[in-house]
Image: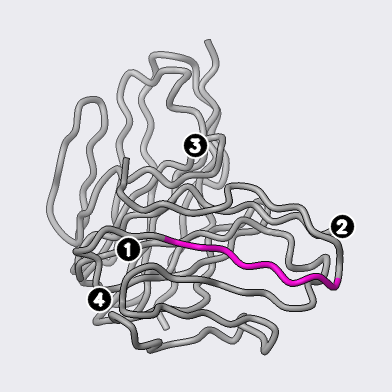
Amino acid sequence: GIQVEQSPPDLILQEGANSTLRCNFSDSVNNLQWFHQNPWGQLINLFYIPSGTKQNGRLSATTVATERYSLLYISSSQTTDSGVYFCAASSGNTPLVFGKGTRLSVIA
Amino acid sequence: DTGVSQNPRHKITKRGQNVTFRCDPISEHNRLYWYRQTLGQGPEFLTYFQNEAQLEKSRLLSDRFSAERPKGSFSTLEIQRTEQGDSAMYLCAGTANTEAFFGQGTRLTVV
């Protein structure tokens, strides 16, 4: 089945800095999602982005399906951005496969 | 609010007891997924339903685990004879064939 790898595993930023999180996947996909897991464990949808580029406020994401990667950009980071960011992908009708996540800590 | 509701939010049980979790997706979610997440890991797929039909089970789903989705609406996940290794966050997701939306999860602690 599809494999999803995320990098870096951990990231520490000063408030106001920008960051880029990467997600590599092993096969062509028809679903790719980015999530932020809050301290209570809920997965918050950030982007549904099997291809192309989307922006939502300080966050944006780009998926280059032909090269099998996706990037999540966080600009002007805030302490509330801290947490774990997951990328998940699937192909055909298969279930989403998650990466191991990137743990982001934003320091004031 | 994703529209997917899970109950209970927390469950503490003694080893050997049975537990049941419930997931209520929105009516448009024809597919429903169960995942398990342990500390420091990403969610791992357990099983999924297309309407009321259970279409796929992971190897993680031992014979102590059973899931149902009667009438294609809510779903239950039961764990029989719980073990300490079952301690985890259990997540449910619903989808109308595109974007998946997750519930708040049920955190199980087996003591």
Q: Check residue A28 in the rendering and tell me which mark sits there, or answer none.
A: 4
* Residue B50 locus on image (x, y percent): 30, 81
Magenta: main secondary structure equals: strand
Q: Residue A56 vs residue B78: left or right?
A: left
The crowd level at tag 1 (other Cα within 10 Å; few <14, some 14-19, many 20+) is many
Q: CA distance from mark 1 to mark 3?
A: 19 Å
* Residue B105 locus on image (x, y percent): 52, 52
Q: Which residue is mark 1?
A: B94
For the residues beneath circles 4 and 2, the answer to whether they share a chain is no
Q: Check residue A38 in the rendering and tell me which mark sits there, or answer none.
A: 3
Q: Disc 4 marks which amino acid?
A: Ser
For the residues beneath circles 1 and 2, the answer to whether they share a chain is yes
Q: Disc 2 marks which amino acid?
A: Val
Q: Nearer the viewer, mark 2 or mark 3?
A: 2
Q: CA distance from mark 1 to mark 2?
A: 30 Å
For the residues beneath circles 4 and 1, the answer to whether they share a chain is no
Circles 4 and 2: CB atoms closer than 8 Å = no
Span shown in magenta = B16-23
Q: CA distance from mark 2 to mark 3?
A: 25 Å
Q: Which residue is mark 2?
A: B111
Circles 4 and 3: CB atoms closer than 8 Å = no
Q: SS class of the residue under badge 4? A: loop
Q: Is residue A108 magenta?
A: no
Q: Disc 1 marks which amino acid?
A: Gly
